[in-house]
Image (spheres, rainbow, N blue to C red):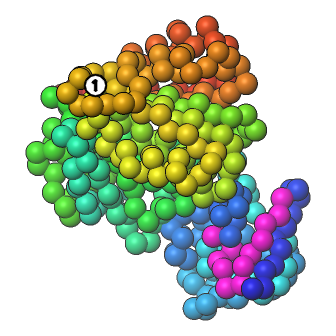
Amino acid sequence: MTTYKANLANQPLCFDIKQDEVILDAALRQSISLPYGCRNGTCGACKSKITSGEITYKNGLTPAVNEEEHNQGYALLCQARAESDLVIEARMVDSTAETTLRKLPCRVTSCEKLSNDVIRLLLDLPKTERLQFFAGQYIDILMRGDKRRSFSMANPPHQDQQIELHIRYYNGGLFSEYAFHNLQEKTLLRIEGPLGSFTLQESDRPIIMIVGGTGFAPIKSIIEHAIHHEDKREINLYWGVRKEADLYMNELAQSWANQYSNINYIPVLSEAGKECNWSGKTGFVHEAVLEDYEDISAFDVYTCGPPPMINAVVESLPSIGLNKNRIFSDSFEFATN
């Protein structure tokens, strides 16, 4: 298959473009974060200048690039395909501060029960819109009375056709009561995002991930992003819950460990009970890390979940060398009515 090289002008970055592959898709596939919005040629957010080389459009010019702009070298990277090696003048999106905060409507397409107290919501954005975000970030669901509820996106950035949320039920929960009892498919919601800085950091250090409950959601996004980009860093995922049934995506997490030699998965139950025949680790999830490691000073630590778990990690792991500059956390606060 023919491939072309694309160089970013004034930056020491280049990436390969497969024959008949959209330029933006090729860049994102290789962790080159270029700006975009709708990904269907409507918004013009990905408009960039081709200073060298030839491009083509499968379906002709789109409204976001007129004939005059095309003749000046401007192209929509979400629609254009390379016909030769290219040099592109484009702005990089290299931090969460550079992602555009947006308010968007979305429609519920699936409301699936994953356990007794966790559901998975799939939300469709308008066909002309996409939400550019970093793995690990979250959105706010905008509710009546200027109320809002925050949920991490469980889908990785390259799967941006839908937004995946994991919602845990809390008695009196600001959104969860509605989600569990009244929310139906095709319901229209409004969201704002992306938000948050709990994202995968550039590093060559091995990783320990300490997760509680639905803190698995952003970790799922981060791990699937790492897999997609063939990140070979060692990942040790500790997922702490009360009972085995609370491991609501246990098979998925186990499949990562089975398929990728750099990923280890260690589920931990705090209330296993003799009747469940659990042969894995028990106790609090941070205690499992303390048991398995004598020194974690060489690791990056990602921890996500309820505040007591985060506090336990921060307070206990310095005893085995936790580097406070290499810990990244996202504390899930509970919001009531």
How many other residues sit within 10 Å of disc 1, few (<14), some (14-19) or many (≥20)?
some
Does the magenta run of residues contain 23?
yes
Q: Is residue 304 above or below residue 57?
A: above
Q: Position of residue 56 (x, y in %)?
A: 70, 88
Can see residue 186? yes
Does the magenta run of residues contain 19?
yes
Rendered-image quadrant of the N terminus: bottom right
Rendered-image quadrant of the C terminus: top left
* Foreground pick, 232 / 244: 244
Q: Is residue 305 above or below residue 183?
A: above
Q: Position of residue 239 (x, y in %)?
A: 43, 32
Q: Which residue is mark 1?
A: 272
* Foreground pick, 155 / 46: 155
Can see residue 174? no
Q: Which residues are magenta?
A: 13-25
Figure quadrant of residue 298? top right
Question: Mark 1: which amino acid?
Answer: Ala
Is 217 on the left-hand or right-hand side of 210? Answer: left
* Foreground pick, 104 / 287: 287
